[in-house]
Image (spheres, rainbow, N blue to C red):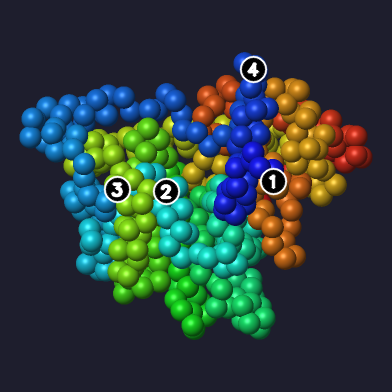
Amino acid sequence: MGANDFAFSHKARRTQVQPVAALLAAALGRDDLISLAVGFVDDETLPTEAVRGAVDAVLGDAGTGRAALQYGTTQGLADLRERIVAHVAGLEGRSADELGLSAGHAVVTTGSQQGLYILADVLLDPGDIVIAAAPSYFVYTAALTSFGAEVHTVAMDDGGMRMDELERVLAGLDADGRLDRVKMVYVVTYYQNPTGLSLAADRREAIVGLVRRFSRSHRILILEDAAYRELRYDGPETPSIRSYDPANETVAMAVTFSKSFCPGVKTGCLLLPDDLVEPVALQKANHDFGSANVLQGVLAELLRSGRYVEHVERLRDRYRRKRDTMLTALRDGLGDLPGVRWTIPTGGLYVWVTLPEAMDAGPTGRLFAECVDRGVLYVPGEYAFASSPGGSCGQNTLRLSYGLPGMDEIREGVGRLAGAVRAEAERIGVASGTEATRGR
């Protein structure tokens, strides 16, 4: 560092360039490129009419309009917090009282990402440990790294994070005398980004008991990220991890309205144990003294009027068809190639593809370059594997999203991907078979 250089903080030096930046750079100037990478929502579903009506309702009265345009509280608009708690309780099929929840446990955030970040800010010091699935939501694991945290990973199967592996990791840290550094277990419970898989129903209560058992010198927090919960296309509604913590001691739930409604509202919420509400609110005050009041008023009106629920139903129908289109295209394009398999999500926006072990799908591999040349973009799976002792790098995996592209683009994009995969398979000597290997 020279005399003319800024002396950046340790945190700034630990902060990495997010992988999405590299993906956007690859797409720059390519009008012909189909992105199956970004987890954006479908442009055609953006609810302009519903939002316009809610804005008119909020601003149409001078009194409510002025209140919406004024500063609000750090914790968030009371009416919105009450409606969010009631909405979450409705998803559980239980009352808020049965869940041990009230509006006082809710902190409104500027998207759920801010909530995840603030919880890390409240709980983590450099050298502390967060346990997450492998693979996991890479945007958050990168943010955790910027705090100086170690991310230790737990293997997944079709039922999400494995409880035997979680117990093994916790027991290993205990044996090493490092259990006191474990502050958080991070779980995306519904239709996980990046795999599209959900935590199995019989693991949700189990994880609460397991984490409590290892909470010896302090409580370890389970951070349940439920960003995709309402985008369910098949199967029953599954109770949250939070529903197994009625004493409100162990689980914080992060919810967002970006995926289930629209990103432009940029509103999320943390549902917190009692003794985390004030510390989170204090840190949020350092960020912004409260999320945009007018957007909170608009969302409260959308929940009150029923327009939000109506929109979610339309989204489910559209995304279900887009998911089916992607799965059909994968079966048609890659179903007979040995060693290729993919998840079959029952909700969310993502399909996780595993290629033959010898195939490199990483950002510097031949397959990624070939796909860009052919005009299709995916997320290399290795981005989703945090550095962890003994962890997999996921070099032969990739994530596809059916959120943004249209039906024809999904078919064409998967076709281009399949062509590139087949060309690479031929190069490395993987022959076609007769039996599909679809499904994780």
Separation (CA) of disc 2 from disc 3: 13 Å
The percent coordinates of residue 73 (x first, y second) are 22, 49
Crowding near the residue tagged with mark 3, few <14, some 14–19, many ≥20 C-alpha atoms within 10 Å:
some
The percent coordinates of residue 97 (x first, y second) are 22, 67
Nearer to me, 352 or 255: 255
The single residue placed furthest to the front in the displayed view is 3
Give the secondary structure at mark 3: loop
Q: Is residue 255 visible?
A: no
Residue identifier under label 2? 114
Nearer-N-terminus badge (4/3)? 4
Q: Is residue 97 visible?
A: yes
Taking the spot 40% from the left edge, 67% from the top edge, the residue there is 251
Q: Which mark is residue 1?
A: 1
The percent coordinates of residue 231 (x first, y second) are 43, 44
User: Residue 18 appears in which quarter of the rendering?
Assistant: top right
User: Residue 391 appears in which quarter of the rendering?
Assistant: bottom right
Separation (CA) of disc 4 from disc 1: 35 Å
Residue identifier under label 3? 289
Give the secondary structure at mark 2: helix
Crowding near the residue tagged with mark 2, few <14, some 14–19, many ≥20 C-alpha atoms within 10 Å:
some
Foreground: disc 2 or disc 3 = 3
Residue identifier under label 4? 29
Crowding near the residue tagged with mark 1, few <14, some 14–19, many ≥20 C-alpha atoms within 10 Å:
few
Give amino acid for label 2.
Answer: Gln
Separation (CA) of disc 1 from disc 3: 35 Å
Give amino acid for label 1.
Answer: Met
- In the drawing, does residue 182 fall left or right of residue 396? left
Asked whether the residues under the numbered discs 4 and 1 touch, taking CB atoms below 8 Å apart as contact, a structural biologist would say no
Give amino acid for label 3.
Answer: Phe
